[in-house]
C-alpha cells in the first residue's frame, strides 16, 4: 500500500478515491504501529469469544434494524410470485437486524436460514418475537471451516453477506466464498455490502489497531 499512499491514490483499479494529505498521514500513522503477530494470532483464535462478549454486553441494542435493505437491493422486490418459494440464508445474522425487517415488510420465504459465529447472537436471534421455528433455522457456525453449512438441507436461492467479510481475515475470503457457492441454487443470488476501501470507518482507526492490509481490530477485540 505504500506506493498508493505516497501518491494519494489506491492501486486497486476500480477504486477511484483520492486520499487527501491528511488522510495519507492517517494511513501512515496506522502503519507506524501494527498489531503484533502474537496478538493477531490471539484475535484470530478468540474471535468467537470476543463476539460472544460483545453480544453479552450490548444484547440487541447495538446494531439498528436494516430497513434500507429492500430499498438498496431491488432483487428482494423483484421476487414476484415466486417470493414465498425462495429459500433465504443470512450469513452473519447477528440478532436479526436484516431478516426481521424483511418479515415486517411482508416478504415471504419458504425457508430462512440464519447463522453467526456467536452463540450468544443466535440465542438473541431466536428470542425475537418474529422467530418461527417451523420456517426458520438459526445456528452457530464458523464460515471459514469445511462443512460450516451442515444445518442447511436444501439449495439456497438468496444469500446475504452484509458487513461480514470485514470481520474475517482476507486469507480466508476464498473459503467463505466457496462455502457460500456450494449451498447456492443454480441461478441463486448473493447480496453483498461492506465497508469501502479508505472510507471513514477505516481512516478513523488509530495506530495499534491495524492487523494486516484492510483488517483492523476494535477496542473490544472484535474485527
Image (cartoon, rainbow, N blue to C red):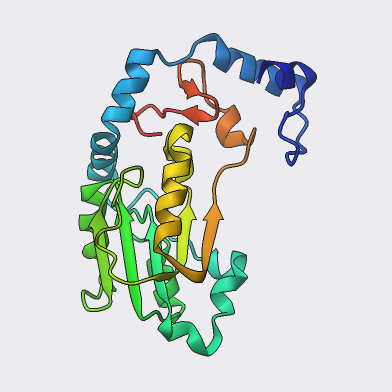
- Indicate left or right for 92 with 21 as reference: left
- Indicate left or right for 45 with 104 as reference: left
Displayed quadrant of residue 68: bottom right
Which residue shows up at 22% across the image and 64% down it? Answer: 126
Residue positioned most to the bottom: 81
**Whether residue 213 is situated above or below residue 74 in the rendered picture:** above
- Indicate left or right for 177 with 199 as reference: left
Callout count: 0
**Whether residue 36 is situated above or below residue 74 in the rendered picture:** above
- Indicate left or right for 213 with 61 as reference: right
| Quarter of the N terminus within the rendering | top right
The image position of residue 182, as x and y in percent, is 41, 59
| Quarter of the C terminus within the rendering | top left
The image position of residue 28, as x and y in percent, is 63, 14
* Viewer-side residue, 154 vs 221: 154
Displayed quadrant of residue 5: top right
Which residue shows up at 74% across the image and 41% down it? Answer: 14
Which residue shows up at 26% across the image and 38% down it? Answer: 48
Displayed quadrant of residue 154: bottom left
* Viewer-side residue, 71 vs 76: 76
Amino acid at each position: 500500500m505504500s506506493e498508493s499512499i505516497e501518491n494519494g491514490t489506491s492501486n486497486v483499479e476500480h477504486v477511484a478515491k483520492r486520499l487527501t494529505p491528511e488522510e495519507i498521514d492517517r494511513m501512515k500513522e496506522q502503519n507506524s504501529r501494527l498489531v503484533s503477530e502474537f496478538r493477531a494470532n490471539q484475535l484470530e483464535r478468540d474471535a468467537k469469544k470476543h463476539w460472544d462478549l460483545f453480544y453479552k454486553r450490548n444484547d440487541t441494542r447495538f446494531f439498528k434494524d436494516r430497513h434500507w435493505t429492500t430499498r438498496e437491493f431491488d432483487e428482494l422486490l423483484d421476487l414476484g410470485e415466486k417470493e414465498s418459494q425462495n429459500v433465504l440464508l443470512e450469513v452473519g445474522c447477528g440478532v436479526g437486524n436484516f431478516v426481521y425487517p424483511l418479515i415486517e415488510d411482508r416478504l415471504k420465504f419458504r425457508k430462512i436460514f440464519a447463522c453467526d459465529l456467536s452463540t450468544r447472537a443466535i440465542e438473541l436471534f431466536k428470542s425475537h418475537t418474529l422467530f418461527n421455528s417451523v420456517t426458520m433455522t438459526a445456528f452457530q457456525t464458523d464460515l471459514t471451516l469445511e462443512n460450516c453449512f451442515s444445518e442447511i438441507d436444501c439449495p439456497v436461492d438468496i444469500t446475504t453477506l452484509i458487513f461480514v467479510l470485514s470481520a474475517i481475515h482476507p486469507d480466508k475470503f476464498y473459503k467463505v466464498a466457496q462455502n457460500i457457492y456450494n449451498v447456492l441454487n443454480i441461478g441463486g443470488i448473493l447480496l453483498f455490502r461492506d465497508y469501502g476501501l479508505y472510507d471513514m470507518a477505516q481512516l478513523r482507526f488509530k495506530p495499534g489497531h491495524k492487523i494486516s492490509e484492510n483488517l483492523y481490530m476494535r477496542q473490544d477485540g472484535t474485527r
